Image (cartoon, rainbow, N blue to C red):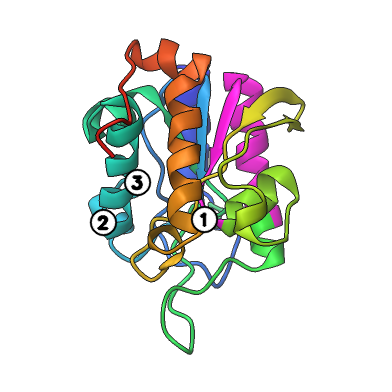
Amino acid sequence: MSPLEALQARLRRCRTCPKMIGPVVHGPPVRSKVYLVGQAPGDKEGPLGRPFAWTAGKTLFRWFHQALGVDEETVRTKVYFAAVARCFPGKAPKGGDRKPDELESKQCSRWMKAEVALLAPTLVLPVGAMAIERVLGHTGPLKEVVGRQFQTTFFGAQVEVIPLPHPSGASTWHITEPGKTLLISALELMRRNPTLVSVFQTQRSLSRW
Ligand code: SF4
């Protein structure tokens, strides 16, 4: 068993957060320089056993296809999928999924720290406001960061960061302005990013947008 597989085996046994609903969800043990950070799995991801397995995933993988011409299975085998929390937080009283609370996010960050130590990623793709806050510490509007590229230190690794909005159907941010235009800028940054280009060995023009 590789160190990454051993880490994921320990992750699967984690029961630290009493309000979280298992199982722990994670992607395959991909040794990738691209580290994607989502918010938390929804209720469908646990039974299906993989992150972004439902409607938000369809949109996310469409963005990858638009930016780099790659399909879902290729993305899943080339990108490491992490999240602020790895278990389903349950439903919020007012509808939608509950957001992981501060303690849960903090407790779950030890898995990120351990993964980053093993993978030494050079590019991080935080998806949605919670992941962006976790990676960049940014708590302001999405329009201030989506469509831009950043350099930061992430659990000791020097990384480039390309923030993405959350692809959830519950959010209209990415289909209304200025989000729509800023998303295209973010996908263009992905298309030109050397780490992504080398991981996928391909480039695709956004000219058909
Ligand atoms: S959310 Fe993270 S820290 Fe909490 S139980 Fe799940 S895997 Fe463990």
Which quadrant is the C terminus positioned in?
Answer: top left
Relative to 209, 8 lies left or right: right
Mark 2: few/some/many CA within 10 Å (<14, 14-19, 20+): some
Residue 70 visible here = yes
Q: Secondary structure at mark 1?
A: loop
Q: CA distance from mark 2 to mark 3?
A: 10 Å
Q: Is residue 143 left or right of residue 23?
A: right
Q: Earlier in the sequence, mark 3 or mark 1?
A: 1
Residue 133: percent from left, percent from top: 68, 53
Residue 115 forms part of the magenta stretch = yes
First of labels 2, 1 by sequence position: 1
Q: Which residues are magenta?
A: 106-128
Q: Residues within 10 Å of mark 3 (few under 14, many from 20)?
A: some
Distance in Å between CA atoms under marks 2 and 1: 14 Å
User: Residue 78 at x, y = what percent?
Assistant: 36, 22
Q: Which residue is mark 2?
A: 54
Task: Give the residue type that dot 1 points to.
Answer: Gln
Dots 2 and 3: beta carbons under 8 Å?
no
**Residue 162 quadrant:** top right
Number of numbered discs overlaid on the protein picture: 3
The amino acid beneath tag 2 is Trp
Q: Residue visible at 57% across and 20% down?
A: 119
* Residue situated in front as seen by the camera: 112 or 143: 143
